[in-house]
Image: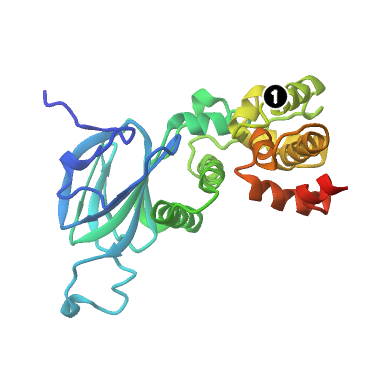
Amino acid sequence: MQKVPIIDYRKANAANSLLPKPSILSSFGWSNLHLEVYQQPKFEIAEHQHTMHSIALAANACGLPESAKQPGWDSLIASGERWLDGKLVRETRKAGDIAIIPAGIFHRCNWATSVEFMVLAIEPTLLQQVGRDFVNPDRIELTPRFMNEPDPLIQGIFSTLREELESGKIGGDLLIDSLKTTLAIHLLRNYCTIQPKLSSYPNGLSQSALQQVTDYIHEQLDQDLKLVELSAIAQLSPYYFLRLFKQRTGITPHQYILQRRIEKAKHLLKYSELSIADIAALTGFSDQSHLTRCFKRIVGITPKQLLQT
């Protein structure tokens, strides 16, 4: 019996052996998430399975001669066929249409013309982490979806991730974390076999859990603190932790961390001989100018002005 190929986007060049051309863009180092951008000629991909949940998005028709371009050609990508878990559907494939290929199911497809498309792969554990306060993690199962309709929110996430991949602007890690959580919640709400329901926390975030989280923040102020780390301490999903933390403290975790960093910086400015640059590093700011901007916005004066008082 012939072995079915496995595409594992945790590894570099995961789909190259099954496609005519390699990807033109590929993400690296995004935890639980991977993006590939492809430009391919007419092709058919052999039956295979994915280790991660995959979303495919039709982007643009490419390589079409002017004589072949008809009214609306830029929105109509190409027709083709797709097999998902043994079911065959002929797809219309307009720009922005998405297909969802859950991890582990059998999949193959063909394209009738040259095309640009993107694939976003998501670790199943991400849905379990985000969704554990909504549904039993063991019962989270994505529904296969053929590429015949768009999803504006997912299309926007694709576009933002591609832009981030191409430009690598400041704050990228925070942006990727935010998009991951947004995407996971959207998939849980709209593409799961079981409709998730909000868990009930009548008492909100417990005092002991809040204390554990704030103690950890104080001990790790010089580190790059992430929402997923803090929510794990509270034993909640990042989404639910964010809501309960703000409900309990009146501010978001990010705002709380910034306040604690400013407080520690003020103390060190007053009672130590450290330079402003050293204080910035000890309190988790990227550099002295970052500390100065945040300090001026919150305190009303710069660190240098505080030293002169």
Kindly indicate the quadrant of the structure image that contains residue 2. Answer: top left
Residue visible at 30% across and 68% down in the picture? 76
Q: Nearer the viewer, residue 5 or 206?
A: 206
The percent coordinates of residue 178 (x first, y second) are 57, 45
Q: How crowded is mark 1: few (under 14 residues within 10 Å), some or many (20 or more)?
A: few
**Residue 297 visible to the viewer:** yes
**Residue 197 visible to the viewer:** no
Q: Nearer the viewer, residue 287 or 212?
A: 287
As drawn, which residue projects farthest toward the right? 309
Q: Nearer the viewer, residue 286 or 195?
A: 286
The number of numbered badges drawn on the structure is 1
As drawn, which residue projects farthest toward the left? 1
Q: As drawn, is 202 to the left or to the right of 231?
A: right
Kindly indicate the quadrant of the structure image that contains residue 215. Answer: top right
Q: Nearer the viewer, residue 289 or 241?
A: 289
Residue tagged 1:
219
The percent coordinates of residue 65 (x first, y second) are 16, 75
The percent coordinates of residue 239 (x first, y second) are 64, 37
Q: Which colour scheme is used?
A: rainbow
Q: What residue type is labelled 1?
A: Glu
Residue visible at 18% across and 59% down in the picture? 112
Quarter of the image where the N terminus is located = top left
Say what secondary structure mark 1 lies in: helix
Q: As drawn, is 243 to the left or to the right of 11?
A: right
The percent coordinates of residue 296 (x first, y second) are 77, 53
Residue visible at 22% across and 77% down in the picture? 69
